[in-house]
Every structure is written in structure tokens, then in C-alpha cells.
Image (spheres, helix red, strand yellow):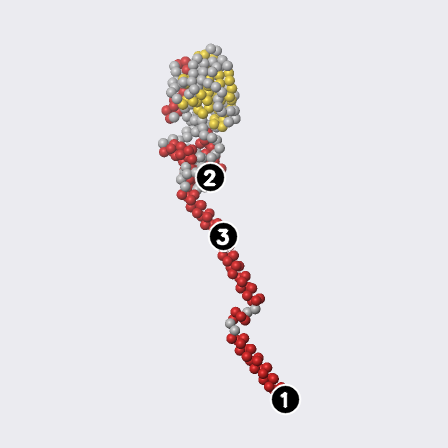
Amino acid sequence: MRLARIRRGCIIGWLAALSALWIALPAWAQDSPEATEPTATAQPAEAGSAEQEADADAGPVEAQAADERSKRRRLGDRALKAGMRGSDVRHLQKVLTDLNFPTRVDGRFGKATRRSVKRYERWKEDLLNGVVHKPQARRMKQLRRAGVRYRKHVFPVRGPHDYGGSGSRFGAPRSGHTHQGQDVSAAEGTRLVAVHEGRVTTREYQAGGAGHYLVIRGKDGSDSVYMHMVRRPVVAVGEKVLAGQLIGRVGTTGGSSGPHLHFELWTPHWFDGGAAYDPLPKLRKWDRQT
């Protein structure tokens, strides 16, 4: 009995000693390997979240920076085309409107702006693609500063000219008929332009008569006629033209005694239920304005 009590007392003593030792151990030694795994994986997860947030923020920041750059651009800093936007596009729209090719001024290069650009290109005989390159933008600004505007009607002969004598007038007698237009004498090769906006309806050659000639139908249905060009006109049937657009050059083809433009105006249509009338008053008016 006494030996059993001694053994029991020893066991109790050892258990007490082990308990005291366990309490004295540091906290990291008490944790199991399994307990440390969540701590080890938690840090990369948090780091990953921070990177994702940084990536998410980068897009808007870059977009905002690009938007700020576009606001500072000036017309002529870059080529402009459909789909672009910025302060330079807004400037382009203002210049087009001032040149009498009106479009919405909103800083966005849309369909309406592209149409106005193409009208300008026809007017100035630029490449017809609806894209405003740097040199073209600079030229637009120069025209605007000079007060140049697209006009609905212009004089057809771009060079020194005169209206001749009585034989050059509308109604002057001819063999078997009367003169149905006004002759404008100029040097051979002088540029000829359309007097109004419209569409080419006729481009033909008549030996012994009109020579190389062209008919343009205006928006109001009236026709303008250009005869005796030095060679075939540079615009084709069905093509749209603007006032001031190059159509050919002064010549003396057909029944002509010297280089000149024989010019006619018809209403409503050329030889198609229409009648010619004296174009000289309008020619003189356009001559003063051009």
C-alpha cells in the first residue's frame, strides 16, 4: 500500500512538472504545423489583391491622361480622320464652318465632319479621302485667316480674260442660228472651274462645233455649259462637283477661231425642255466677287 502511494505521488509530480513546462513554452511552439498554413497563404493572397487593385486603377488613369493630351492638341499637330476626338478636332470643325462648310462643333470627328472635309477637298482639289493631314490643316487655317470662304457661285476662268466684242455676246448672229452663250477669251491652258455645285450630266466632243465640252446640272435644275476645252474635261459623267472645282482648261477645239471659253446657262435643262439665257450679267457679278 505504501509503495502504491509512493508511485502515485511520483506520477502526480511528473504530471505537474510537465504542465508547468507546457505553460512556460512560447506561443509559437504550441501551434501545430497545420495552424501555420493559413498564415503562410494569407500574405500572398493579400499581395495579389493589392496588385489587382493597382491594375484596375491603371486603366482609368491612362485614359484620363490621354484625354488630357487630346484636349491640349492644336489643329495641325496630327492627321485627323473619322473616329478621332479632341481640341484639334473641335478647331477643325470651327475652321470648316468659317470656310462655309458647316458642321457640328463638338470635338468628335463623325460622319458630318467627314462630309464637310470631303467637300473642302473637292473645292481645293485635294486627295478625296476625308482625312485631314498636317499640311492640309495648315492650309485651312491660312485660308481662314485670309477671310477666304467657299462661294455658291464663282467665275469660271481662273486667269486674265476679256469678254470680247459684240460678236461674243449672247444672241449674236451666226450662220443659220444665233449665239446661245457668252465667249470669254483667255490664254490656252488657263484653268476652268465649275461656276456652281452640281453633277456632271454630259461630257462629249463635237468636231466642227463645241469641241470638248461639259454640262453640269445645278441643285436647282439649271445647267451650265463649257465648250472648246483644250482636251477632255477632267471630271466624269455622274461626278459631283463644287463651285470652284477644276473641270478642264481653256482651248480652241471644235469650231473655234482662237482659245476661249464658250459659256452657256440654261433653265431648266440644256436642250431638254429648257432655254438658254444671257449669262453675261451673272458672269460680271461672279467676276467681281471672285
Residue furthest front in the image: 3
User: Considering depth in this image, is 209 or 71 the residue closer to the camera?
Assistant: 71
Q: Which residue is pictured at 38% across the width and 33% down the height?
A: 142
Question: Which of the marked residues, 3 or 1, is nearer the chain's N terminus?
Answer: 1
Q: CA distance from mark 3 to mark 1?
A: 78 Å
- Relative height, residue 118 to residue 206 (above, below): below
Give the residue type that dot 2 points to: Phe
Q: Residue 166, how many percent across, how many down?
A: 39, 14
Q: Quadrant of the N terminus?
A: bottom right
Give the residue type that dot 1 points to: Met
Which class describes the residues within 10 Å of circle 2: few (<14), some (14-19), or many (20+)?
A: many
Q: CA distance from mark 2 to mark 3?
A: 31 Å
* Label disc, if present, on residue 1 of the rendered structure: 1
Secondary structure type for disc 1 = loop
Q: Residue 30, how many percent across, how many down?
A: 54, 71
* Label disc, if present, on residue 109 of the rendered structure: 2
Q: Which residue is pictured at 46% across the width and 39% down the height?
A: 109
Q: Which residue is mark 3?
A: 55
Q: Residue 54, how many percent across, how many down?
A: 48, 54
> Does the image show residue 189?
yes
* Label disc, if present, on residue 171 of the rendered structure: none
Quarter where residue 8 is shown: bottom right
> Does the image show residue 267?
no
Q: Residue 80, how many percent across, how many down?
A: 45, 37
Q: Which residue is pictured at 49% across the width and 13% down the height?
A: 208
Which circle, 3 or 1, is nearer the viewer?
1
Q: CA distance from mark 1 to mark 2?
A: 108 Å
